[in-house]
Image: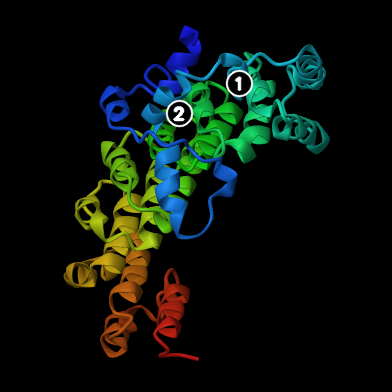
Amino acid sequence: MNLPRRIAASGVAALGLCLAAQASVAETRPIAPRQALVGPTVRAERELWCNFGAHAQQMASVPATADPVFRTPTPQAKARLGEARKPLLGKANATPAQRATLAALFAGPEGPTLARLALSDVDPGMLATSLDAARPIAMVHPRLAGFVTPLAVHADPRVAEAAVHFLFATGCDTPALFALDALRHPSETVQLAVMAEVQTSLRTRRDLGLAGRLLGWVTEGKASPTARAEAIRKVGEVGWLPATQEFRGLTKDASGLVSGEALVALAAVAPGEAEPLLPAWLSSRDPVRRAAGVRAAANALASRPERLAKLLEPLRRDPQVSALVAQALAYARLEP
């Protein structure tokens, strides 16, 4: 097997991990086609399919001509990819028809190897469109993530955002963790894409350390208050209990947006810890803090409506938060 194929198959260079130990204990049974995964075996099969060390071991004995990702495409298939590429060069956005053309190529018999070539392109328009078009085969061919990982920090926000979605679409832990590198991207659009994927992952999969890393990025304080507050909101909406300590610390953040969102999240996962903080927030001169206090009170005291009504009574006529107060009381079924 040639060197580039061996490196990408193991994930050592592209994914930045030492998988020698993983490969030594990898299961020797063949890795089943991923399209066939159904029922209660999905998780076990997914973990095997995402074992890049197992892939390296198994593919070492497979001729390159039989490797769906690394085989050489036929001249005809390569020509079709070239034709699809031409109208994308230098373009800001692809048309639905152009994206569909690439998606059809990647879904075909030579799709994985054509996707490999497309994901190695240098043109941002081609890269962004290829990442979107190849996303449906990301789970079936997770080794393609080796070509996508560096693109999560690509200078072009379109490419970086599409790379984030592709890495999470593999359904594999390692690419998802590397997608968080995109939080360093200067574009808030890219940062928000990471947050949305983390939230979805927390709702549908076990914790991979994604929430902790996302909140660690919030704590660093290098991003805008708006982006940091949104990250807290994404994790808080899931009700992620292991994040309690991070939420508690972030209630002291210098930004009112960030600290307020942290209080709301803390009230959702640990009401008893948030309740003693509520009076100070509700009586603050800062309307941002008062609004956060009302939202947090609605979370912390949802099961104690009388206490909630007593706390919020002084704010019923506050023009800056009265609408939030009404919503909170309605949520607790204290008003029609």
Q: Nearer the viewer, residue 18 or 250?
A: 18
Where residue 264 appears, as percent x and y from the top left, is: 32, 63
Q: Nearer the viewer, residue 140 or 163?
A: 140
Q: Quadrant of residue 283?
A: bottom left
Where residue 202 appears, as percent x and y from the top left, is: 39, 54
The correct choice, above or below, for 21 with respect to 199 in the image is above
Total number of numbered labels? 2
| Comparing labels 1 and 2, the label whose residue is closer to the camera | 1
Residue at image coords 80%, 22%:
84
Residue at image coords 50%, 28%:
143
Whichever of labels 1 and 2 marks the residue nearer the N terminus, that label is 1
Identify residue for label 2: 185
The correct choice, above or below, for 236 with respect to 153 in the image is below
Q: Amino acid at mark 1?
A: Ala
- Relative side of 308 to 112, left or right: left
Q: Nearer the viewer, residue 283 or 258?
A: 258
Q: Amino acid at mark 2?
A: His
Q: Count residues near mark 1 (Cα–Cα under 10 Å), then give few for <14, some for 14-19, many for 20+.
A: few
Q: Count residues near mark 2 (Cα–Cα under 10 Å), then give few for <14, some for 14-19, many for 20+.
A: many
Where residue 257 appears, as percent x and y from the top left, is: 36, 52
Where residue 171 appears, as percent x and y from the top left, is: 48, 43
Helix, strand or loop at label 1? It is helix
- Whole-angstrom CA distance, mark 1 to mark 2, is 38 Å
Helix, strand or loop at label 2? It is loop
State the scheme by which the image is colored: rainbow
Residue at image coords 60%, 21%:
66
The correct choice, above or below, for 171 with respect to 1 in the image is below
* Numbered badge on residue 66: 1
